[in-house]
Image (cartoon, helix red, strand yellow):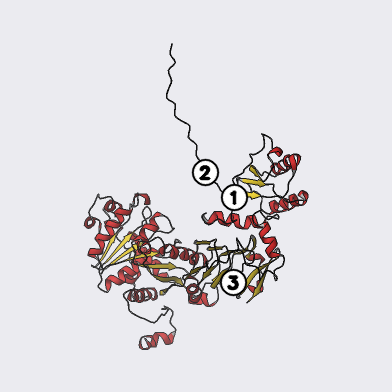
């Protein structure tokens, strides 16, 4: 049974696209058939983060408007064969997305894939509402700071009212992904801590991704962190989040790259 | 010669209703104007572009008085679109028309968008002269707060709205008929507006506007982080709230013309 997942946040720059790529790659590495759709028409980025920017021929708009077939527009990843990408158009704007067209594309993708992951643009306008419209599951990406938390709260309200499921009286399953988390700074009170964010948003936590320079390095290399450096703390956090999405119950930990001498010597044995 | 009668299109008339703000000056007029000036000093441009109706039922200024009052308001850049509660003989042709069909409305009508609600609710309230709709009711109910208990409260229908989920940022809950109970938190940037009391079994981080029809209404919350609290038109922003009550379980009620807040 295919699931449609939207990765959304309201605020920009919190890590939606990075998380979409990392989670998609993690799910695909675990053997699932995964397609990533970039809904950020006009400001497409997912192709860059996935390292597929040189292979884009047709895009979502072409498929929505019927100019290209879905199979022509899908780009299969070279590293993980079960991972595909449907890029956004850079030259058009979000008005080119029609509700019926998006419904048709998503219905078609649901027949072929296990996970259809929609990378939402920032904001609460047309692009974002269309990206969340057909979702069964939503991941709300939040940074531990007040503006991001408030925007996420707004998006959760929209997920409860503007989605197809909400209109049918059903619920969209919502998960919180806390990104760019720095345990040391949160401990010093310079950032919101996990409890604060959970208390405000009151949705279940899917994972905590530690702030890491590896994430930016991977994005610039055009490779999701979960493929580029699977041993890094951020990648391990994404792998855990992907397992939780598949229904596994794991203890919530914040992986860390920092290890003392003892950790280096005994880290493996302790784990 | 015959004149050709060209078929003319008939003129169309529409009826339309608008929300307008009602200003009702009270005697002594000099004090009322001083109060208005104080309000304008705090919120310059508040009346800019807003339709204002002048209710003269309380002031009863007479023909000369109307002209002076209009002059006074014009000096403050308040444009009056119509006059209510006046004798037709007081008005001349150059003055705004006499409105007869206006009915008293709730100061926070249920059907208007959040932006308008947030503008009109605290606005009408903080006006030194309470608007005509609210004045008689609040005067009766508020002056002897202890003795009103045996009297039947104005709206005691079993008409409360229970919300089982948190109120998210950007959502606006409007329930003019009774109490609102939220089992969960009210987020920063969210708004709950009730005709009666507001009960929040969680943290109140947004705005709570209670008692648009009942000055006996109260606001309760488990943890106070509110941006704005208002009861029957009076309001208080976060800055005005006592610092030691932030983060505490509190209740707020009206005593006469002031809001009282206490820890629960």
Where residue B198 sits in the image (x, y, percent)?
A: 57, 68
Q: Are marks 2 and 3 on the same chain?
A: yes
Residue under label 1: B103
- B222 vs B103, nearest the viewer: B103
- A31 vs A215, nearest the viewer: A31
Query: What is the quadrant of the C terminus of chain A in the image?
Result: bottom left
Indicate left or right for A63 with B174 as reference: left
Q: Are marks 1 and 2 on the same chain?
A: yes
| Contact between labelled residues 3 and 2, with CB atoms less than 8 Å apart | no
Residue under label 3: B220
Subunit that carries the residue with mark 1: B
Label of residue B16 in the image: 2
Q: For numbered disc 2, what is the local secondary structure?
A: loop
In this rendering, the answer to whether B51 lies above or below A29 is above
Indicate left or right for A30 with B51 as reference: left
Q: Residues within 10 Å of mark 3 (few under 14, many from 20)?
A: many
Kindly indicate the quadrant of the structure image that contains residue A210.
bottom left
Please tell me which of labels 2 and 3 falls first in the chain.
Answer: 2
Please tell me which of labels 1 and 2 falls first in the chain.
Answer: 2
Where residue B94 sits in the image (x, y, percent)?
A: 67, 34
Query: What is the quadrant of the N terminus of chain A in the image?
Result: bottom left
Where residue A246 sits in the image (x, y, percent)?
A: 31, 75
Subunit that carries the residue with mark 2: B
- A119 vs B82, nearest the viewer: B82
Q: Residues within 10 Å of mark 1 (few under 14, many from 20)?
A: few
Tally of numbered tags = 3
Q: For numbered disc 3, what is the local secondary structure?
A: strand
Which one is in front in this view, the residue at disc 1 or the one at disc 3? 1
Indicate left or right for A195 with A61 as reference: right
């Amino acid at each position: 049974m295919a699931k449609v997942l939207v990765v959304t946040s309201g605020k920009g720059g919190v890590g939606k696209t990075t998380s979409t790529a990392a989670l998609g790659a993690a799910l695909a590495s675990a053997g699932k058939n995964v397609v990533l759709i970039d809904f950020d028409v006009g400001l497409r980025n997912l192709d860059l983060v996935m390292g597929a920017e040189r292979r884009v021929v047709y895009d979502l708009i072409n498929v929505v408007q019927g100019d290209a077939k879905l199979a022509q527009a899908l780009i299969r990843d070279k590293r993980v064969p079960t991972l595909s990408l449907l890029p956004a158009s850079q030259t058009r704007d979000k008005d080119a997305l029609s509700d019926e067209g998006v419904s048709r594309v998503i219905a078609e993708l649901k027949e072929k894939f296990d996970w259809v992951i929609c990378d939402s643009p920032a904001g609460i306008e047309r692009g974002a509402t269309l990206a969340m419209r057909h979702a069964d599951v939503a991941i709300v990406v939040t940074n531990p700071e007040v503006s991001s938390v408030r925007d996420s709260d707004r998006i959760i309200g929209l997920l409860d009212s503007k989605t197809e499921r909400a209109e049918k009286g059903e619920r969209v399953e919502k998960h919180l992904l806390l990104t760019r988390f720095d345990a040391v700074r949160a401990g010093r009170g310079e950032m919101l801590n996990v409890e604060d964010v959970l208390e405000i948003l009151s949705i279940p936590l899917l994972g905590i991704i530690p702030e890491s320079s590896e994430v930016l390095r991977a994005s610039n290399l055009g490779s999701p962190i979960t493929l580029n450096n699977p041993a890094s703390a951020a990648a391990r956090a994404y792998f855990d989040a992907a397992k939780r999405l598949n229904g596994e119950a794991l203890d919530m930990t914040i992986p860390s790259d920092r290890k003392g001498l003892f950790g280096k010597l005994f880290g493996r044995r302790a784990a | 010669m015959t004149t050709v009668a060209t078929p003319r299109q008939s003129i169309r008339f529409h009826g339309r209703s608008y929300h307008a703000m009602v200003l009702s000056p009270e005697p002594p007029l000099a004090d009322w104007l001083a109060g208005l000036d104080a309000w304008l000093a705090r919120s310059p441009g508040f009346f800019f572009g807003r339709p204002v109706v002048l209710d003269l039922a309380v002031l009863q200024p007479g023909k000369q008085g109307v002209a002076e009052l209009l002059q006074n308001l014009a000096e403050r850049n308040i444009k009056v679109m119509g006059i209510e509660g006046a004798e037709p003989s007081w008005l001349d042709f150059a003055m705004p028309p006499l409105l007869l069909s206006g009915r008293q409305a709730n100061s926070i009508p249920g059907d208007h968008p959040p932006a308008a609600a947030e503008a009109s609710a605290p606005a009408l309230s903080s006006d030194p002269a309470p608007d005509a709709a609210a004045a008689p009711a609040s005067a009766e109910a508020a002056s002897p707060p202890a003795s009103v208990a045996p009297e039947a409260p104005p709206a005691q229908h079993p008409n409360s709205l229970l919300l089982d989920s948190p109120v998210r940022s950007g959502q606006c809950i409007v329930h003019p008929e009774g109490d609102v109970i939220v089992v969960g938190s009210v987020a920063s940037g969210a708004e709950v507006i009730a005709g009666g009391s507001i009960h929040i079994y969680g943290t109140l981080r947004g705005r709570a506007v209670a008692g648009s029809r009942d000055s006996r209404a109260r606001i309760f919350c488990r943890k106070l982080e509110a941006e704005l609290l208002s009861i029957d038109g009076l309001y208080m922003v976060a800055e005005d709230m006592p610092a030691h009550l932030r983060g505490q379980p509190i209740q707020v009620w009206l005593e006469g013309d002031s809001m009282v807040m206490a820890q629960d």
